[in-house]
Image (cartoon, helix red, strand yellow):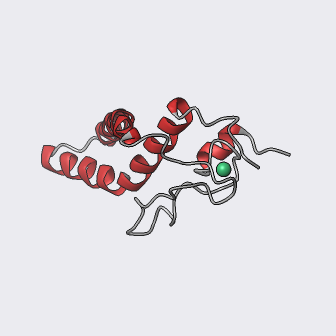
Amino acid sequence: MKVSLAKALLNQRCPTCREGKMFKTSSFNLHFMEMNEKCPHCQVMLEPEPGFYQGAMYVGYAFSVAIVVAVSLLVKIVDINSPWISIGIVSVITLLLVPFNFRYSRVLFLYMFGGLQGKART
Ligand SMILES: [Zn+2]
């Protein structure tokens, strides 16, 4: 049975077979940016064309804005009066979420624009 699209996306799996891992290491590793060139399961190229992931920066930017807005609202609700502490909290949380932002922006971009669904070579 094929894994659902949402589950494959959340687990950062290849959009074609939904089994092979897109990244070489876990999100908590310092080498969190290293991607597999090909899917280890179905061998499809995970970078459809050179420079493909430059477009993922726009997705990452949208994620960053969403994170900053969400954390800013939380800081506002908690009612921290010092602007420097608020900026510090928002900055630290945004920096801690960089690996997730980086990875999910690439995963989402590949799922949306990679055109890899149905290209399995089995
Ligand atoms: Zn695959």
User: Is residue 105 placed above or below 113 in the rendered structure?
Assistant: below
46 or 107: nearer the viewer: 46
Q: Position of residue 13 (x, y in %)?
A: 62, 50
85 or 39: nearer the viewer: 39
Q: Position of residue 47 (x, y in %)?
A: 48, 46
Q: At x 29% / y 54%, what residue is drawn?
A: 95
User: Is residue 45 placed above or below 119 in the rendered structure?
Assistant: below
Q: At x 60% / y 46%, what residue is drawn?
A: 10
Tell me if 84 is positioned left or right of 25 in this view.
Answer: left
User: Is residue 52 placed above or below 24 in the rendered structure?
Assistant: above
Q: Quadrant of residue 117?
A: top right
Q: Position of residue 28 (x, y in %)?
A: 45, 66
Tell me if 63 is positioned left or right of 79 in this view.
Answer: right
Q: Quadrant of residue 39?
A: bottom right
How many numbered markers are drawn?
0
19 or 101: nearer the viewer: 19
User: Is residue 122 placed above or below 53 in the rendered structure?
Assistant: below
Q: Position of residue 7 (x, y in %)?
A: 68, 44
Tell me if 77 is positioned left or right of 107 in this view.
Answer: left
Tell me if 86 is positioned left or right of 93 in this view.
Answer: left
